[in-house]
Image (tube, rainbow, N blue to C red):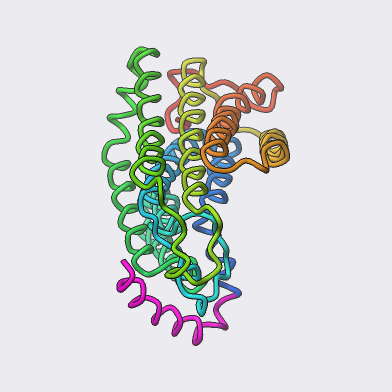
Amino acid sequence: MEPYLEAETGPILWLQEWGRPLVAPMELITHLGSQGVLIVLGATVFWCVNAGLGARMFVLLISSGVVNGLFKSLSYSPRPYWFDARITGYHHHSGFGMPSGHSQAAVVAWGYPAIRSGRRAAMWAAAVVVLLVAFSRVLLGAHFIGDVVVGLALGILILWLFLRYEGRVLAWWLGSEPRRTALWLLIVVLTPCVIATAWQYGVRGDWTVPTTEWIGPTPADPAGASLAGLYTACGGLLGGVAGLTLLYRRGWYSAEGTITARMARFVLGFSVLVVLLVAERILFRDLTGLALALVSFVVYAAAAFWASYGAPRAFVRSGLATSAEVEGRGGGR
C-alpha cells in the first residue's frame, strides 16, 4: 500500500498549498457529508416534515454507515496526515480512512431526495454538493483521493440498490411475521460486527500502528475507534428499524401540524437524545476497544429507538401529532 499512498501524497500537498483560500469555506461544506449532521437532518424530516421520507432517509443513511464502518474496520488504511507529517489535517479523526464516509453519505443523503423529486435542478444541485464534499475531504487532509473514489462508488451502489429494491423489501418486511423480521434484523446488524471483530482480534490481532511508516500524528488506537464506529452504526440500525417497524404496527403517525407543534417536536425529540448521548460521554469516556464498541452499540440502539418510536409516540400522546390511519398513510410513509 505504501507506494500507492506516496503517489497520492504529492497531489494533496500541492492542493493544500494552492488551495489555502478555500480551506475556510470547505470546512463548512464538508459538514454536508457528515453522517451525524445528516442523521439529524433525517430525524428532523421524520419528526417535523414527512414521516415516510424521513424514515426512508434514516434507514438509507444508517445502512450506508454500516457498510462504511465495516470497510473502515477491515481496511487499516491511514489518513493522509497520519501518513505524512507535511500534510495538514484540518479535521482530525480517530478511525481509519478507507473509504470516505463523508463522500459516501453525501451521495445517499442528497441523491435520494433529489432523485425521488424527479426534478433535474434538484439532481444537479445534489451532484454539485457531492462533488464539493468529496473535494473538501482531500483538501482538508482527511482522505486520500482513492478513499474518496471508493466512498463515492459505494454511495452510488447503495443508492442504486435502495432505489431499485426499497418497495419490494418494504412490502416483504411489513408483510412478514414479527419473529421473522426480528431474526433477520439481528442477522443484518450482528453479522458486520462479528466479521470486523474476528478480523481485528483474530486475523489482525498483532497489528500495531506502523510508526516508522506513518510519521504524522496518528491516534493511539485507530482500529478500536473504527470498530466502535461500526458498532455505533449497527446499533443505530437495530434500534431504528425495530422502532419504525413497531410504530407501523401501532398505527404510524403523521408529521403534519402547525409550525408551533413541529418546533415543539423538534425540541422534545432532540432534548432526550442530547441527554442520552451526553450521559454516555460522561459515564463511559474512559472505555476503549471492544468495551467501547459494545457500549456504543447499546447506547445508539436506544437513541435510534427513541427517535423512531419513542418520540413519535410521545408526540401523539402529548397532542403534538396524530396517528395516521392505515388506509390514509400514503405519502406519509
Residue 267 coordinates in the image, percent (x, y): 72, 38
Give the mark count: 0
Which residue: 46% across, 59% down? 209
Who's the residue at 38% across and 12% down the image?
A: 179
The segment highlighted magenta reads 1-23
Residue located at (37% from left, 19% from top): 183
Q: Which residue is drawn at 47% across and 16% down?
A: 249
Q: From the viewer's perspective, is 270 left or right of 325?
A: right
Residue 77 shows in the view:
yes
Residue 187 sits in quarter: top left
Where is residue 122 drawn, in percent x and y? Answer: 42, 58
Of the pair 44 and 72, the residue shown nearer to us: 72
Task: Assess whether residue 18 is covered by the magenta stretch.
Answer: yes
**Quadrant of the image for the C terminus?**
top left
Question: In the picture, which quadrant includes the N terminus?
Answer: bottom left
Looking at this view, name the residue that lies furthest to the bottom.
18
Task: Where is residue 143? Give x, y as percent.
Answer: 44, 66
**Residue sticking out furthest to the front:** 206
Relative to residue 119, is residue 295 drawn left or right? right
